Structure formats: C-alpha cells, structure tokens
Amino acid sequence: MLSTRGPVVHRLAVRRPGFRPHIAWGLVLAAVASGARLSAQAVDAAGSAPFEVWEASIPELQAALESGRVSSTELVDAYLARIAAYDRAGPTLNAIIRLHPTAREQARRLDAERASGRVRGPLHGIPILLKDNYDTFDMPTAGSTVALAGWTPPDDAFQVRKLREAGAIILAKTNMHELAAGITSISSLGGQTRNPYDPARNPGGSSGGTGAAVAASFGAVGWGSDTCGSIRIPSSVHNLVGLRPTKGLSSIDGLIPLSHTQDTGGPLARSVVDLAIALDATVGADAADPATEAMRGREPVGFRAALDAGALAGTRIGALTEWLSDSGAEAPVTAAVRAALDAMAAAGAEIVDIEIPEQDSLLANTGVIGHEFAVDLAEYLAAAGGGPVASLGEIVELGLHHEQLDGTFRRRSEAGPRDEAAYAEALERQAALREAIVAFMDAERLDAIAYPTLRRDPARIGSPPVGGTCQLAAHSGLPAISAPAGFTRTGMPTGVELIGRPFDDARLVSFAYALERAIEPRRAPPRTPPLVDGRAPEPIRFSVVGDGGWAGRPAAPRLHGSFSLDLPRGTLRYLISTSGLGPADAHAIVLQRRGSGTRPNAVVRRLSGPGHASAEGTLTLSAADLDDLLAGRIELALYTADRPRGAVRLVLAPEG
C-alpha cells in the first residue's frame, strides 16, 4: 500500500556550525541550553585559547593538529580528563572499561611523525575508542566478561590493524553487554553503562559503552559491532550516526563472535563526516573473513568522497507504516521520525507510506544467533589460544558472568548439539528475506526504506527494552544506517533507520549526510559539558526574588528562591522562602513548565504543600526537565488561598 506525504519541514534542535565551547561558564550554559558550540577562538582572561575537544569533529581536530595549536599528546590528555570527570564521577556513565596503558606513548610517536613531515591521513594522531570485543595485541580483550578479564589475544583484529596503519590512537576499550548477548550494556566485568542524556535510562547495546563514550566526547569516534542492532540502537539513543554495513563490506576477523553470519563491525560517530572518515579507514577485503570475498573486484568504497548534501533530491523513500505507530508509547518516536522524513521531503525526496507484504512471516525463524553463539565462541577461543576458559558452558559452570545473562547463557550452552536442519533452514530463510526486500524495493522503485531505529524511548535501567526493529537488516545482511532524527518530548534522542540494497552503503551514508545538513540534529548531552580548568564545572547558581507583578496590591506575597544545579549529576538543590504570607495561606510551591512544543504548561515538581510557606531539598531532573531549565522554560510558582490560580510566578535564570 502506498500513499504520498507532503513536504513539510520541521526544524529540530540546531547546533550552529563553527562554534566551540570555552571556559566562560555563562557562555557554556548558553551553549548547553541551545545545543550550540562556542567559538574556538574565544579567549579567557589571560588571553590564551586552549583547544576544546568537547564535540570536536575529526576535521577540526586534524586542523588544530596541522596548525600546531594542539598536539596529539595534548588531545589524549584532554580526553582522559573528560573520562576522569564524567565516567566514574559526575553522571558516572561507566562507559570505559579499560584505558590503553600506552595511549600517551602512541601520541608522542605520532606527534614525532607529524613533525618529520609524515601525516598518514585524516585519522593521524586522533584518539579513538574500541568496544571490548575488538582484539588488540597490546591490551586485554575481554568481551566485558570476568571470564576473560586479563586475557590478551595474540594479534590485532583486522579493523584495529587498519586503524593503527591510519595513525589512530587507541585510547580506551568501552564497556558492552557481556559477550554482546543483549542490548542494555550490562556486564560482569564492566557493570551497567548509563546514558549521558539521562543516566536513569538505558544506553542501548551491545555497543552501549561506545555510544555513551562518543556522545560524551571521551574520544573522537568509537567502534562497535552489530549482530542485531548493536551499532544502530546505541547510535539512536545517543544522538549519533552508525552504519550496519552490508555483510562482507568490512572484516569481522578478531571480533569476539556472537554469530559469524550476522556479526558486523564499524564506527559510531557524532557526525556523518566523522563516520565517513572512520569507514574509509576500516572497510575492505580480508582473507581471514570469507564474507569479504564479496568485495573482490569491486571499486573501493569512498565514503567521504561520496558525501553530497543534495543526495536526497529525486529519491523515493518508503516509510514503513508497520513500525510507525501514532498511538501509545511509540507515538513520541514516530512524531520525531515523521518530522525527519518531512525534512527529507523538503530536501527533494518523495516519501511514500509502505507495507512490506507478509513482513512478519518473512522475518519468522530467520535469526541464527542461537545456532551459532556457543559454537562460534568456542572456535574463537581455541584459535586464539591461551585463554582462561574454552567455552560458554565453562563460563556458566564457573559463574564467570553477570546474573542478568544467566538465562541466555545457560539456554545457549545447554542446548546440546546444534540442530543442523533447523540451522540450514534459518540460513535459507535469511536468503529469502533478503531477496524479498530487494524485490519489493525494485517493484516500488524505492531507494531506501525508513523506520525508527527503536520504536520507543530508551527504557529505564532495570526495565526491559522494547520496540526493536533490528532484525530487518541483521537477518537479511542488507546495509542500514541509523541517523539522528532529533529528540522526543521526553528530552531523549531518537533515530531514523534507512535500509538499502546490497553495497548501497555509501549512498545510505550520503542520505544521512543530506538529512544532517537539513535538520542539524546534534545536541550534546548537558550532563557532560566542557571542562573548566580540566575539571567538571562548578554548580550553576539560580536565584529568583519577586512578587510576580503584585507590587502595591494588598497582601502581595514575595518569593525568595535560591537554586544550585550540579549539571553532571543533574541534581537541583533548592531553598525557598516567602514573605508577606502566613503558612496557613500557602497552598503549594512548585516548579512549573512554561508550555512549549509538545510539553504542556504544567507542574513539573511539587516543592511544598498546604500549610508550608518554605521549602528545601534536592531534585534529580529528567532529561526533559533539565533541557527546559537550561532553556529558561521552568518557573517557580506560588499558589495561595487568596490566589489559587497562582500568586507569584518567577522564571528561573542563571545568576549573571
């Protein structure tokens, strides 16, 4: 079924290009509130202009290195300072599982190369992050399980080797859902990773540590793996862009396997340009990965060269209505994705609503993780040699795993010999799914199919995640990119996924680039702002005093409010008093939202109730409440017996 939608543009949160943060905190607050970046040329009182890595792109980092404004060693120190401030302190993201012990030494060598006139390319001297399932010969690779905590593999993964050749600095390994077997990023070795936009919410997975770390500017770009959504889901919930490549476009040699048929690896980035640079460095054929034979004889993929702001013009994009519900918990995400599709239409795309015939039937029994996980892991451990365990069954028997993985691991390890007939059927069904999707796209003349990466906001930690759409690409082997679609009314990021034909990867990345240029969706997490003198900023002070315009009237009360916002922790300390008002006359003192967009003008938090003319305490703010406070959309309100509709309303604004 097809229906054409009109080209309505929705402008989402805008980050003004060319602006960079600095240590003048009043300006930083404005940047955090608006999503903007402050000028890289801004100077402090002493007249110096230290380079700020917060939200810096790879081209910006490279330009600063080329000009001599900063060294790679200084970049390493700057990112390490951010990790120290926000990973175990502040919002305690718990995204980093291990720092590379020679990161500074790597940087010094690459600085020396640059000084001698050798620059390997756009990643030369750039600090990057790796998921803890990428083999590295010089530091442990554990899959975030205590079973492999101190084990170092004999050599690098293919993509890691390519990164070293490109001059990248391996800064750290990131936490992941243990052995990649889930999407909440909890593990026995790393614990629970948290989302920097709201630490109470899920960071996605299994590359949740990479997603949180890249979003918080712990490195320039980070690598993850995707077996069924593990690059795309963390990209969606962290306002990032991530590509699940066509199976065979990049090698999985040296990645701890979950399912060799479905496993893929690649970067997550804050911008499409950064993603393209990272992909250019790591794709290509590899004799150790038979799937990459598909690359033999193909023209080299040039992702950065293919970027085109006009790429959407003349395209036909199918909006998959099965996963675009306008009701219930899915409605906020659908609204954001529809807005992104409208922006694509304004950029020249024809957007049509579609239904894939017999979609549920096509997807049924196409997954092979259950058939491959235990077998693949045992083969990987045997080939690498020297590991402390030899199988998933041994990990379970010794209790070397997080209890939240116990059911999955036991089910996979105790299933007995693989049912080869069922396995063969699943592989056949994957091929049939791939053929059906491509045939449908051909019949409807579609350049891509669009749908939400995740149909709901990320679940709160401890609640099961729902609303996944990962199977369509993962079970077909087709390429799919998750691009930022903006934010929902909860203040959380969400993504639109575009799936294409085999080896349409560069085209999908260019579509994402055109969308990014149209809506400029990137907004940094407020809880991980620029550092001040190498440390997290001091609390932001707010104060309000006034009578709300009742001056000169009988019995006009006054409110006195003092607030202190710990931005990294998202906590607001308050001390409220009143004058000209007896306790018996007080109904309530509240924080109230000034209506805007999809958020109503309503009470956000009750600070005190009837009979209390003062209030004191501490609140932990949600993502939406923190956004609105920083944007000046929260006011302190007093309700009294004389004026039950509101005696005083004062907008909270930062001091100075």
Image (tube, rainbow, N blue to C red):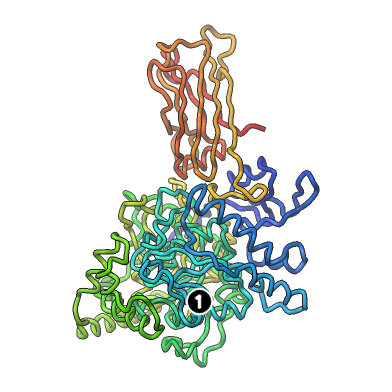
Q: Nearer the viewer, residue 332 or 261?
A: 261
Q: Quadrant of residue 403?
A: bottom left
Question: Which quadrant of the figure has residue 53?
Answer: bottom right
Image quadrant in which you'd find residue 277: bottom right
User: Is the residue marked by circle 1 packed among few (<14), some (14-19), or many (20+) residues within 10 Å?
Assistant: many
What residue type is disc 1 on?
Thr
Residue appearing at x 35%, y 79% in the figure: 434
Looking at the image, residue 595 lies above or below residue 140: above
Rendering coords of residue 501 (x, y %): 43, 78
x, y percent for residue 409: 27, 69
**Pick the front one: 359 or 633:** 633
Is residue 12 something that shows in the picture?
no
User: Label 1's element?
Assistant: loop
Total marks shown come to: 1
Compared with 59, 296 (above or below) is below
Q: Is residue 238 left or right of residue 169?
A: left
Q: Which residue is mark 1?
A: 136
**Residue 445 relative to residue 30: left or right:** left
The residue that appears at 59% across and 64% down in the rendered structure is 220
Q: Quadrant of the C terminus?
A: top right
Location of residue 498 in the rendering, given as x and y in whole percent from the top left corner: 45, 68
The percent coordinates of residue 111 (x first, y second) are: 71, 72
Q: Residue furthest right?
A: 47
Check the image and name the residue furthest to the top: 554
Q: Nearer the viewer, residue 161 or 397?
A: 397
Answer whether residue 421 is visible to the viewer in this image: yes
Q: Quadrant of the N terminus?
A: bottom left
